[in-house]
């Protein structure tokens, strides 16, 4: 029987007629499409049975069957599976779906994406790559999509990546962005966080490579910390303990219990290993702060086991305060005034207005980068008679504070509010509360990494080698110190809990030190003459070699200093340097210098200046060696 005469099963007749009517309303369709749909319905009166076939079978569906399959998908008669949908190029979906029950939801999605600031090309890609596929497979409206729908889609992406052996970054990116759009349109499933190990890995996984007898008490310790520490803090402790656990697995794999640890056999070799440890990425020695963290984490672990009376606790103290390396205390890395002005100008001219204004706000308030990202939409408070204040939420030190704002800084906040993306509140990653954050873009919070990238770009534009966000905080604090801000006020503005933290900035430009220096310098100039590195105004009435001064013969001249100034620590330093070179053409200069040095020895001995005479003799010995080497060459 010819294909065009194939009879459609009675149970599928209504579906076939609906397909013909839909095709007719769109002015499309031909005998080939009609025959393909009839043949399909003969074999699969219920299209959902076709969807249960293996992927390779579903992928054999030819082009003539595509219009009928599209109709079934658009009208909810077929949910073909995300695996098949990911293999299909749905070029015509946006046009064909407009005349189907999916049409209104797709229009809403594109409008929502536009409201969040996505470009036309991005909206089109997200609609066809994600939104249409979610609606087809789930059979629900946008507002009814759940976490399970996204999870199934992501699982299908992962399966295809395994099959093809390469990542599908465009699909993952589109799914990540589309989920935020759909959330702001009213769906219950919230935007997915950035992928990280925080909260996803078990403590056992963090301690991979650690023997079971050692891993067991470590895991119990980390679980005990969950009641008093943030997850991120415990994760850091787990990483530090893992280094020690893996060290024990290598050095003493048969160790049955931590109670058998020995200071000389286990702890001291580990301290040596930490002292010589290298960064896995750079290959450079680890920072002193990293070494300190590893040792402190281990000591706290042992102390806690002893306090809690655990059987695995070592029988005696193994880690002491003197085992912890001392950290350097560098001055804050503030930007010099010219660099500061250049960077601010680059940010003010930036095309990335939202990110640049966020960094300008950071510069004008001295916030930490995490505090900036956590600012809420209502963070500016007007206080009668006291102007505008910025409320900084709980952050690194779990304290809140208020920072005063001038009119220009309030204007920066106003620009941020005008450029941020609108939408529903987002879940706070630390508290779990729904919050309207100040810094949002395309329906999501702006990350610290994004802000750092913009600062890096602006620094290059300003001609700086680079800049990091914390330098803006240092620059803010330094400017306050230079303006005479008190220690108490500086602590309040920066959110420091100890005076020691704020005193670092006081060390930069301490006014008392400056005043004492200027007073002492003026006194020295009055009593001893100039002591700065400049020519001493001495008028000689005799040969310089016989002047009652401290004298030094140099290759190209000589130096005279008053007795009060003392000998110069740099006199003849070049002649004594192992890198100093001479040659035969310079022998006359060296010989003349030697003759003068001999005269200076005699002058110093006559005056009773023994150290001076010895200094000149050392120069003569060095000149003799240079002359001999030049003659030999």
Image: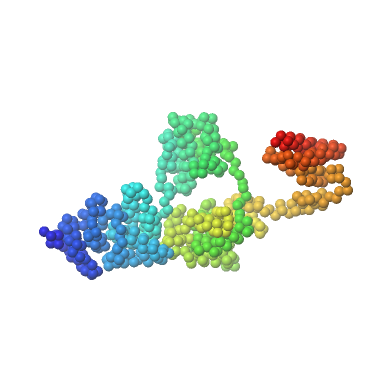
Q: Quadrant of the C terminus?
A: top right
Let me know if residue 144 appears in the view: no
Pinpoint residue 611: horizontal percent, then vertical percent: 80, 37
Name the residue located 81 percent from the left edge and 43 percent from the top edge: 551
Let me know if residue 632 appears in the view: yes
Quadrant housing residue 388:
bottom right
Name the residue located 53 percent from the left edge and 55 percent from the top edge: 456
Pinpoint residue 585: horizontal percent, then vertical percent: 74, 41
Name the residue located 60 percent from the left edge and 61 percent from the top edge: 341
Pinpoint residue 528: horizontal percent, then vertical percent: 82, 49
Q: Seen in the image, is 255 located left or right of residue 54? A: right
Extreme residue in the left direction:
1
Residue 34 to residue 588: above or below = below
Which of these two is toward me, 618 or 171? 618
User: Looking at the image, what colour scheme do you see?
Assistant: rainbow
Q: Quadrant of the N terminus?
A: bottom left
Quadrant housing residue 87:
bottom left
**Number of numbered markers:** 0
Pinpoint residue 445: horizontal percent, then vertical percent: 45, 58
Q: Seen in the image, is 605 located left or right of residue 430? A: right
Which of these two is toward me, 454 or 149? 454
Residue 106 to residue 57: above or below = below
């Amino acid at each position: 029987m010819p294909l065009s005469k194939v009879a459609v099963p009675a149970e599928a007749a209504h579906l076939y007629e609906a397909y013909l009517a839909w095709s007719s309303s769109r002015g499309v369709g031909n005998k080939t499409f009609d025959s393909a749909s009839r043949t399909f319905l003969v074999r699969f009166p219920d299209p959902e049975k076709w969807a249960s076939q293996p992927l390779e079978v579903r992928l054999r569906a030819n082009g003539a069957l595509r219009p009928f399959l599209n109709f079934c998908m658009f009208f909810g008669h077929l949910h073909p599976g995300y695996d098949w949908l990911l293999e299909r190029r749905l070029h015509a979906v946006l046009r064909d779906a407009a005349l189907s029950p999916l049409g209104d939801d797709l229009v809403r999605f594109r409008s929502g994406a536009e409201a969040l600031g996505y470009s036309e090309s991005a909206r089109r890609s997200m609609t066809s790559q994600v939104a249409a596929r979610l609606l087809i497979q789930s059979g629900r409206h946008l507002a009814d999509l759940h976490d399970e729908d996204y999870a199934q889609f992501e699982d299908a992406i992962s399966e295809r990546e395994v099959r093809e052996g390469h990542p599908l970054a465009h699909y993952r990116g589109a799914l990540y962005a589309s989920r935020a759009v759909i959330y702001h349109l009213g769906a219950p499933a919230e935007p997915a966080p950035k992928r990280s190990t925080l909260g996803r890995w078990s403590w056992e996984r963090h301690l991979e490579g650690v023997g079971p007898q050692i891993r067991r008490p470590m895991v119990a310790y980390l679980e005990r910390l969950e009641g008093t520490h943030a997850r991120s803090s415990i994760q850091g402790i787990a990483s530090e303990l893992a280094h020690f656990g893996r060290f024990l697995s290598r050095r003493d794999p048969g160790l049955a219990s931590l109670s058998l640890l020995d200071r000389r056999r286990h702890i001291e070799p580990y301290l040596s290993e930490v002292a010589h440890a290298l960064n896995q990425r750079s290959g450079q020695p680890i920072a002193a702060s990293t070494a300190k963290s590893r040792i402190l984490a281990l000591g706290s672990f042992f102390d806690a086991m002893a306090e809690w009376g655990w059987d695995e606790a070592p029988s005696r103290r193994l880690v002491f305060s003197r085992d912890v390396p001392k950290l350097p205390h560098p001055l804050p890395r503030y930007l010099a005034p010219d660099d500061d002005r250049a960077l601010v100008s680059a940010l003010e001219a930036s095309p990335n207005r939202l990110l640049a204004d966020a960094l300008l706000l950071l510069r004008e308030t001295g916030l930490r980068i995490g505090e900036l990202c956590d600012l809420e939409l209502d963070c500016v408070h007007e206080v009668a008679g006291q102007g505008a204040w910025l409320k900084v939420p709980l952050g690194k030190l779990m304290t809140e504070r208020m920072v005063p704002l001038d009119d220009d800084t309030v204007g920066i906040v106003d620009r941020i509010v005008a450029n941020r993306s609108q939408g529903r509140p987002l879940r706070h990653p630390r508290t779990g509360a729904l919050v309207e954050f100040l810094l949002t873009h395309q329906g999501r919070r702006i990350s610290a990494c994004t802000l750092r990238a913009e600062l890096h770009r602006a620094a290059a534009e300003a001609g700086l080698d680079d800049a990091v966000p914390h330098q803006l905080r240092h620059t803010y604090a330094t400017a306050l110190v230079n303006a005479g801000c008190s220690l108490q006020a500086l602590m309040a503005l920066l959110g420091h809990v100890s005076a020691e933290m704020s005193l670092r900035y006081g060390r930069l430009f301490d006014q008392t030190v400056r005043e004492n220096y200027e007073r002492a310098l003026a006194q020295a100039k009055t009593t001893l003459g100039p002591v700065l590195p400049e020519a001493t105004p001495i008028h000689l009435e005799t040969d310089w070699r016989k002047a009652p001064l401290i004298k030094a013969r140099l290759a190209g001249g000589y130096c005279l200093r008053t007795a009060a100034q003392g000998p110069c620590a740099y006199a003849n330093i070049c002649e004594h340097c192992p890198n100093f070179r001479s040659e035969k053409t310079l022998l006359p200069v060296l010989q003349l210098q030697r003759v003068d040095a001999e005269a200076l020895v005699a002058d110093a001995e006559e005056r009773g200046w023994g150290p001076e005479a010895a200094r000149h003799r050392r120069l003569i010995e060095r000149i003799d060696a240079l002359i001999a080497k030049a003659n030999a060459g």
